[in-house]
Image: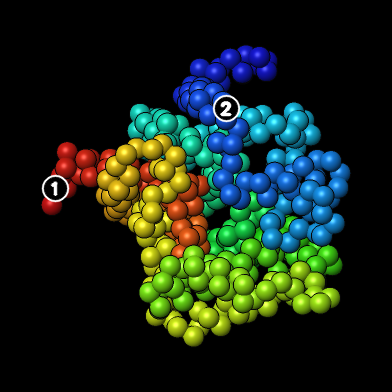
């Protein structure tokens, strides 16, 4: 069969049609947004674009016009934007369009995952919903990490499920999976500990299956070797450039200026944003001759001290942040909602809470349904990834956009739960 024949055959498949639908929706959305390029930006976007411009112009990984090596952000997303700039120019409109069209590919691994859990019709409905899901469409053109993280996470979960189902088991396949997890961590630093979590999940599955220890260790060794090289290599770079083995300075900023400020604000009954500015001023800038690395290491240590000094406040702000990430912002409408000027923002926010609460309940049922169908290991892997990404995003500043990369998996499990309940009612168990 020739390549052209294979291409024509693929173009008639469900996933090809869904991909085309995704592309059309994203281009239409981009056209609606492109009249004002500032719509593609949120507060963090400028930092990513500046780093990308520096990379694409050959000035290294530092803010545009700066000689100080970048330590706060990791190179994954700026590198992605730099490639777009190198190929197509540095127009915000162009970057948003290329990002939206490229990351539309997330429907390919998502469809393959869905077909494992659902019949053809239900799988198509699931993926179709994600092509028009507002949170995903909105962030497809935003110059933030969400769109690229979504694509990478779908690839990672698809590969992990294929491994746990023993469909792919070669050394090369495990190495590729490990590399994809490492790239995801460079795009979204909260994925730093995802490899150890996956190792534990696969070890539990292997133990329950009574798999040979030597075989299991060989697989997991192949899974971790590339992340050790790529993630550890970046930490060595940071030690050489800024005198810190930390993977990203954002970890220190989050610990002190976000979580620490949130704990103090909760304890004192104050706005945590006000506390954050006070902490920023109190901490000050680097000491004379102090490298960025030790500066942010001090910031991290002080943040940890604040959290340990008041564990009840720490637990409270973590749980509230977890609720905001899992369900939607409870205090102020998310930027995603605010943009649309809907008039009744509070009503929309509470509606989101209701929908997402039901979704989590149905997803839990979906895990049980999947286990009854013999897909327990696959559901276990997927659930572990979803929970890990959501929990690590929890903090005083937590928005629904942080949930974007795992949203399709959550809906997939929920629809699996709905289908399972319907089948159970239609075909009651006969004792």
Give the farthest residue toward the bottom.
Answer: 309
The image quarter containing residue 343 is: top left
Question: Can the viewer see residue 88 in this picture?
Answer: yes
Residue 34, label in figure: 2
Q: Residue at x 82, y 60 (%)?
A: 68
Mark 1 is surrounded, within 10 Å at the Cα level, by few (under 14), some (14 to 19) or many (20 or more) other residues, namely few
Relative image position of residue 328 (x, y in whole percent): 38, 52
Relative image position of residue 305 (x, y in whole percent): 56, 83
Relative image position of residue 365 (x, y in whole percent): 29, 52
- Where, quadrant-wise, is the N terminus in this rendering? top right
Mark 2 is surrounded, within 10 Å at the Cα level, by few (under 14), some (14 to 19) or many (20 or more) other residues, namely some
> Left of 141 or right of it: where is 76?
right
254 vs 121: above or below: below
Q: CA distance from mark 2 to mark 1?
A: 59 Å
Q: In this view of the protein, which residue sits in the foreground, 10 or 133?
A: 133
The secondary structure type at the circle numbered 1 is: loop
- Identify residue for label 1: 430
């Amino acid at each position: 069969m020739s390549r052209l024949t294979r291409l024509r055959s693929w173009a008639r498949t469900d996933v090809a049609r869904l991909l085309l639908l995704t592309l059309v929706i994203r281009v239409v959305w981009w056209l609606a947004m492109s009249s004002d390029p500032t719509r593609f930006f949120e507060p963090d976007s400028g930092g990513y674009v500046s780093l990308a411009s520096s990379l694409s112009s050959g000035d290294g990984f530092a803010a545009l016009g700066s000689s100080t090596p970048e330590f706060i952000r990791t190179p994954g997303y700026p590198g992605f934007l730099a490639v777009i700039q190198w190929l197509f120019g540095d127009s915000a409109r162009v970057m948003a369009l290329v990002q939206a069209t490229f990351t539309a590919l997330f429907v390919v691994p998502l469809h393959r995952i869905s077909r494992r859990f659902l019949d053809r019709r239900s799988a198509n409905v699931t993926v179709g919903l994600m092509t028009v899901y507002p949170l995903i469409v909105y962030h497809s053109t935003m110059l933030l990490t969400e769109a690229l993280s979504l694509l990478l996470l779908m690839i990672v979960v698809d590969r992990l499920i294929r491994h746990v189902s023993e469909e792919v088991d070669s050394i090369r396949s495990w190495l590729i999976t490990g590399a994809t997890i490492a790239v995801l961590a460079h795009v979204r630093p909260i994925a730093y500990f995802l490899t150890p979590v996956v190792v534990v999940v696969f070890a539990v599955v292997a133990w329950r299956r009574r798999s040979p220890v030597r075989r299991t260790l060989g697989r997991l060794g192949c899974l971790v070797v590339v992340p050790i090289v790529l993630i550890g290599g970046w930490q060595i770079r940071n030690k050489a450039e800024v005198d810190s083995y930390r993977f990203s300075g954002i970890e220190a900023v989050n610990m002190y200026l976000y979580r620490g400020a949130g704990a103090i604000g909760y304890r004192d009954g104050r706005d945590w944003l006000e506390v954050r500015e006070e902490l920023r001023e109190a901490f000050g800038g680097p000491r004379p001759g102090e490298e960025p690395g030790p500066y942010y290491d001090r910031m991290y240590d002080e943040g940890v001290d604040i959290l340990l000094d008041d564990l009840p406040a720490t637990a409270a702000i973590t749980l509230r942040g977890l609720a905001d990430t899992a369900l939607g912002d409870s205090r102020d409408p998310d930027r995603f909602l605010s943009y649309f000027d809907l008039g009744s923002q509070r009503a929309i926010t509470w509606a989101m809470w209701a929908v997402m609460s039901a979704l989590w309940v149905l997803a839990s049922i979906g895990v049980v349904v999947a286990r009854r169908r013999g897909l327990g290991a696959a559901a276990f892997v997927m659930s572990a990834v979803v929970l890990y990404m959501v929990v690590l995003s929890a903090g005083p500043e937590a928005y629904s956009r942080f949930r974007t990369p795992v949203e399709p998996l959550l809906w997939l499990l929920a629809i699996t739960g709905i289908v399972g309940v319907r089948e159970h009612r239609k075909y009651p168990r006969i004792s």
